């Protein structure tokens, strides 16, 4: 078992990464909740696949389950209203503890419910997708979408405890698993050459679902994200590096109307584009760029991006909410394990990088 402490300004919480930890959830959760009531806000899909384990694991504690149908189109304030009303109907008071169970959507929605219900109740995150384990569940960001854009309403609300059980990944689709693996590679590129190399050489084991590799990859990702977030809780500076691959990745997601690609797949393309951009502006040495690209493509396929217009994708970059004072910041690898944040890159260079990344994926993608 790995118990990784994450320190924030307000508190310190533990992230537990352990195969089988759902089955003994009660003993891990009890020290945090005592005899308070736990309300499990559970994504229906995750609940159907893994809920029985949590239910048995929590035996002995005061808990009840609120299953909810989620999905990107249900990550909305209306669902937050629905859930907070359900909490109130069941008599949840300020001592209630919300346990968010499911992927990143459950974490974001239930986390925001916890952040706002009665001006804030405690939340325990229990992420059940790889993406949520390596990314969404650490850092305290919660929120929902607006019709006009993703994640535009929300709050920072740090969890009291995070439970990650790599066994939950057994029921996840290979495509969802693959999307999460790209975010692990991202952590390697921005922070740890060792993680990157282990993922490069462990590709076949990762694809085959090797539990030891997953435990390692999740724990390392949590450690890296935790370290970055500790130093910069609210995204003033350093935290921006977590956005590597996301500036162009988000633009691609938007351009394909969130239908063609999973988030992690868009980020994979975004990392390739960032590498090419980095090389074009003299930040990323070409052998490092190639190595990053090879490993990303080896984890593919990324769905075919044929017919996409690089200019349109690049035009969307300036609409990203992460722009600061109208300036677009790109996170460019200086070498594997180290990045540079750069703004003021000429728009033509961004278009060129987007185009050459589209070409690279077309050459490497098999679907
Ligand atoms: N808060 C953050 O810092 C942060 C960071 C990254 C992403 N996110 C958010 O995360 C969301 C994406 O998360 P996601 O990729 O986990 O998607 P998701 O929550 O939609 O889960 C993906 C699918 O897997 C199913 N599922 C979940 N766990 C399962 C399991 N163990 N077995 C079988 N099926 C299971 C779900 O029902 C769903 O259909 C986005 O909305 C994104 O904005 C938030
Ligand atoms: Zn991401």
Image (cartoon, grey):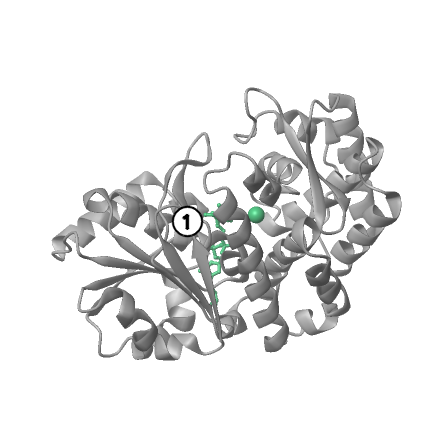
Q: Say whether residue 125 is visible.
A: yes
Q: Position of residue 329 (x, y in %)?
A: 64, 30
Image location of residue 241, percent across then percent down = 61, 42
Tell me, yes or no, if residue 306 can be seen here.
no
Left or right of 299, for residue 146: left
- Left or right: 9, with 292 as reference point: left
Q: Position of residue 283 (x, y in %)?
A: 80, 36
Q: Is mark 1 within 8 Å of ligand 1?
A: no
Q: Quadrant of residue 220?
A: bottom right
Give the side of residue 302 with respect to residue 222, left or right. right
Left or right for 95, reference 335: left
Residue depicted at x 54% and y 62%: 130
Please tell me whether mark 1 sits on a helix, a strand or a loop: loop
Q: Closer to the camera, 162 or 362?
A: 162
> Label 1 crowding class (10 Å Cα cut-off): few <14, some 14-19, many 20+?
some
Measured as percent of width and height from the top left, residue 261 is found at 61, 48
Vertical arrangement, residue 54 with respect to residue 74, above or below? below
The C terminus - image quarter: bottom right
Residue sitting at 62 percent across and 34 percent down?
A: 251
Residue at (70% x, 74% y) in the render: 205
Residue tagged by mark 1? 8
Give 119 or 106, whichever is nearer the viewer: 119
Q: Residue at x 75, y 29 (%)?
A: 350
Q: How many marks?
A: 1
- In the rendered view, tell whether residue 61 sits above or below residue 217: below
Query: Based on the displayed image, in which of its 4 quarters is residue 343 positioned?
Result: top right
């Amino acid at each position: 078992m790995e118990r990784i402490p994450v320190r924030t300004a307000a508190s310190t919480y533990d992230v537990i990464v352990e195969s089988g930890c759902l089955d003994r959830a009660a003993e891990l959760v009890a020290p945090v909740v005592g005899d308070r009531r736990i309300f499990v806000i559970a994504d229906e899909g995750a609940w159907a696949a893994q809920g029985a384990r949590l239910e048995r694991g929590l035996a002995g504690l005061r808990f009840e389950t609120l299953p909810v149908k989620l999905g990107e189109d249900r990550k909305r304030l209306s669902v937050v209203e629905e859930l907070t009303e359900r909490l109130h109907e069941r008599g949840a008071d300020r001592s209630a503890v919300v346990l968010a169970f499911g992927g990143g959507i459950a974490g974001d929605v239930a986390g925001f419910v916890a952040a706002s219900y009665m001006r804030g109740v405690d939340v325990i995150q229990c992420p059940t997708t790889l993406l949520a384990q390596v990314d969404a569940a650490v850092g305290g960001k919660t929120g929902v979408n607006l019709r006009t854009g993703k994640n535009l309403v929300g709050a920072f609300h740090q969890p009291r405890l995070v439970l990650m059980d790599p066994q939950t990944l057994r029921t996840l689709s290979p495509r969802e698993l693959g999307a999460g693996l790209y975010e692990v590679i991202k952590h390697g590129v921005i922070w740890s050459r060792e993680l990157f190399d282990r993922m490069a050489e462990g590709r076949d084991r990762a694809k085959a679902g090797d539990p030891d590799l997953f435990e390692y990859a999740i724990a390392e990702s949590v450690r890296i994200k935790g370290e970055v977030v500790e130093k910069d809780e609210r995204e003033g500076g350093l935290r921006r590096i977590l956005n590597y691959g996301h500036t162009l990745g988000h633009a691609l997601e938007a351009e394909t109307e969130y239908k063609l690609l999973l988030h992690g797949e868009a980020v994979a393309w975004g990392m390739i584009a960032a590498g090419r951009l980095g090389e074009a502006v003299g930040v990323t040495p070409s052998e490092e760029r190639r190595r990053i690209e090879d490993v990303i493509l080896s984890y593919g396929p990324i769905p075919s991006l044929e017919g996409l217009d690089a200019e349109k994708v690049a035009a969307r970059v300036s609409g990203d909410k992460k722009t600061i004072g109208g300036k677009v910041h790109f996170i460019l690898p200086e070498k594997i394990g180290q990045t540079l944040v750069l703004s003021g890159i000429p728009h033509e260079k961004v278009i060129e990088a987007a185009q050459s990344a589209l070409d690279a994926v077309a050459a490497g993608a098999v679907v």
